[in-house]
Amino acid sequence: MAILKVRAPPRAPAAFGAPTAFGVLTALGAVAAFGALAALSACGFRLAGSDTLPGILARPYLSLKDPYTDFSREFEHQLKGAGATLQLVRANATVTIEVTKDLVQRRTLSVSALNIPTEYELTYTVTFAVQGPDKELLAPQTISLSQDYSFEENVLLAKEHEADILRQQMARDLVAIAMRRLTRLK
């Protein structure tokens, strides 16, 4: 194993108190970064997923059909990341978020001349609703995403791994959609 060592070129000594070229460039870079940040925040730009949850969702009870699915784990993580304190008992919660459907389906799209699948479609469907203390805050919402992927029998493990990655990404995308809908609650 070779170790590569890189040394910075020696700098010429600067007169006492005189700024070096490196110092000036660093200061200019910091000013430019601050200016860009100020400009982005002034136009209303926010990072994806940085929306704050309304006060009613401060202490939700999360009712999941299966707590071990990709969607369920990511949804719980995103709610906590947005500042929600998940309640273990429904009676202590401000609202109940109920996930009634969390389903991944795989459908064959095409087959070879030997009747071996060559392309699949992966569909991830989720249905959720939000119930307040005295009324329904969000009617049942069904969201679904689909993705095609090719299949080759001779690289079975790689293709199964590709399907897992697609499923996880679709779950993250579905959670992002659900979180945007939750942030619009009043």
Image (tube, grey):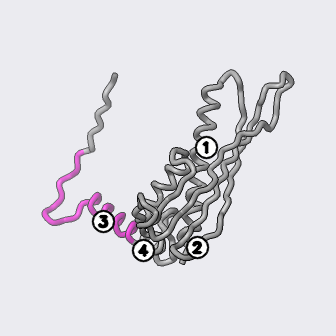
Check disc 3 and report its element: helix, strand or loop.
Answer: helix
- Please state which of residues 143 and 102 is positioned toward the viewer in this rendering: 102
x then y, percent, for residue 166: 62, 43
Q: Residues within 10 Å of mark 4 (few under 14, many from 20)?
A: few
Foreground mark, 3 or 2?
A: 2
Amino acid on which disc 3 is placed: Ala
Which segment did they paint magenta? 10-34
Earlier sequence position, callout 1 versus callout 3: 3
Earlier sequence position, callout 4 versus callout 1: 4
Please tell me which residue is depicted at 26% across the width and 61% down the height of the picture.
23
Residue designated by label 4? 38
Amino acid on which disc 2 is placed: Leu
Q: Left or right: where does residue 113 sit relative to residue 141? A: right
x then y, percent, for residue 124: 66, 48
Disc number for residue 27: 3
Q: Is 22 in the magenta?
A: yes
Disc number for residue 167: 1
Query: Do the residues bearing badges 1 and 2 touch, measured as CB atoms within 8 Å?
Result: no
Disc number for residue 137: 2
x then y, percent, for residue 13: 17, 54
Foreground mark, 1 or 2?
A: 2
Foreground mark, 4 or 1?
A: 1
Please tell me which residue is depicted at 27% across the width and 43% down the height of the picture.
8
Relative height, residue 62 to residue 65 (above, below): below
Outermost residue on the front side: it is: 91
* Disc 1 from disc 3: Cα separation: 45 Å
* Disc 4 from disc 1: Cα separation: 37 Å
Say which quadrant the N terminus sits in. Answer: top left
Check disc 4 and report its element: helix, strand or loop.
Answer: helix
Relative height, residue 51 to residue 147 (above, below): below
Check disc 1 and report its element: helix, strand or loop.
Answer: helix
x then y, percent, for residue 11: 23, 50
